[in-house]
Amino acid sequence: MSLFTYDASRALYDRAGMSIVGGVNSPARAFKSVGGDPLFVTRAEGCHIWDADGNRYIDYIGSWGPMIAGHAHPEVIAAVTGTAQSGTSFGVSTEAEIQIAEKIRSMVPSIELLRMVNSGTEATMSAVRLARGYTGRSKIIKFAGSYHGHGDSFLIKAGSGALTLGVPDSAGITHGIASDTLVAEYNNLESVQKLIQANKNEIAAIIVEPVVGNMGTVPPLSGFLQGLKKLIAKSGIVLIFDEVMTGFRLARGGAQELYDITPDLTTLGKIVGGGLPVGVYGGKADIMKCLAPLGPVYQAGTLSGNPLAVAAGLATLNLIDNAEVYTRLENSGKMLEQGLLQAAKNAGISITINRVGSMLTVFFTSGPVTDLSSASRSDTIKFSRFFRGMLNRGVLLPPSQFEAMFISLMHDEDAIKTSIKAAEEAFMEC
Ligand SMILES: *Cc1c(COP(=O)(O)O)cnc(C)c1O
């Protein structure tokens, strides 16, 4: 085991704190829930990432989802640098925007029309506004522990960063907005049914992560997603699948393909931008046509459909648009899952692993983990010891119990075996 030092990262963190609030541009990067100072990265390639001290890690953050093809993939880099030669933004339409829209529609057939934005947050905010405009109703249902970006309406029992920082509800959200967000329990149809009954003709949309990634990986129990769709049949409620994390990750067509459910609207982000800032929302044409310039719901963006972002996204989608990719990711995921389970068993540590394809979370609880309350039973102290143990052996995990590890196409057998070997030792330190 090499001895890792973090002096350069620590110095950068100190300097960052003088200009950037909290030293980071997104709270999850602060490593608050696992202790120690956050890393500063200098470069990444394939499944590896290097920090400012020159330490090399096998990376399971994957930029929190986008890097399915691996870091600095030559085709993505060539697309971005080639496009940049012709200018970085025009504020006027390009043919590449049509190409990526056609590509997205061919991979996610429930999307008849779409609109590009600059982040997952923008996509979910806009999709909910659209659902409200379309239905003329105000309220939405979301699930406890789900994260849909940092839009005001969603920061009620939000997952991930909000969970680990112990701020389940953000300050600065007005009472009016909070009262329009109803919270149901994931994998619990009865909790949804009760809210629908108590708010007849008032609910515009249900927004759901079809596989939750933001309280750690939590898959839908058999019949849950089908049940949701049944519950809202003829209710006028718009079903929004937030596939910002699962889109293009779990299958070509995302979770909706994997579980064979057609939502009314879908939000995308992360992979669709190939590492540049992109969000997308789309779905049924009659709903989408309520958007300006065709309809009364306004939504716009100076940099929406930005040429560099579109180039990176399109190159990434081209790389993953075949079934073999998902077989390979499944095999890598299974190998890692089995290795981690065995390593924990050998160390006498009780864990539950939830995994769907290349998305996986090691929960430090005997489980099962099916919703926010069962996820919350995890021993986060043990997780932070595990995180540190892995980091010091050259494996970078997402710095929170309530996040998913992401496997890319560049995580080969070697990388996974090395990760399992590190885990065998790290579990011993938990
Ligand atoms: C990451 C994420 C978002 C927010 O996307 P940003 O690009 O970070 O704004 C929304 N929904 C889900 C399910 C996500 O995982």
Image: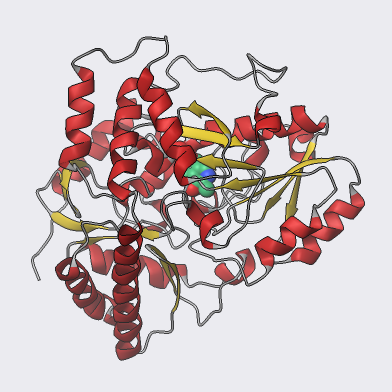
Q: Position of residue 373 (x, y in %)?
A: 63, 68
Looking at the image, residue 106 lies above or below residue 323: above
Q: Position of residue 63 (x, y in %)?
A: 33, 46
Q: Position of residue 285 (x, y in %)?
A: 65, 32
Nearer-the-camera pick, 343 or 174 = 343
Query: Relative to 394, is 428 on the left or the right?
Result: right
Looking at the image, residue 425 lies above or below residue 147: below
- Quadrant of the rendered image containing residue 278: top left
Q: Position of residue 355 (x, y in %)?
A: 44, 69
Q: Is residue 85 visible?
A: yes
The residue depicted at 28 percent of the width and 15 percent of the height is 88
Q: Is residue 164 visible?
A: no
Looking at the image, residue 77 lies above or below residue 236: above
The residue depicted at 34 percent of the width and 35 percent of the height is 313
- Quadrant of the rendered image containing residue 316: top left
Query: Relative to 78, is 203 on the left or the right?
Result: right
* Number of numbered markers: 0
Where the C terminus falls, by quadrant?
bottom left
Where the N terminus falls, by quadrant?
bottom left
Nearer-the-camera pick, 370 or 135 = 135
The residue depicted at 54 percent of the width and 45 percent of the height is 109
Query: Relative to 27, is 156 on the left or the right?
Result: right
How was this image coloured? Answer: secondary structure
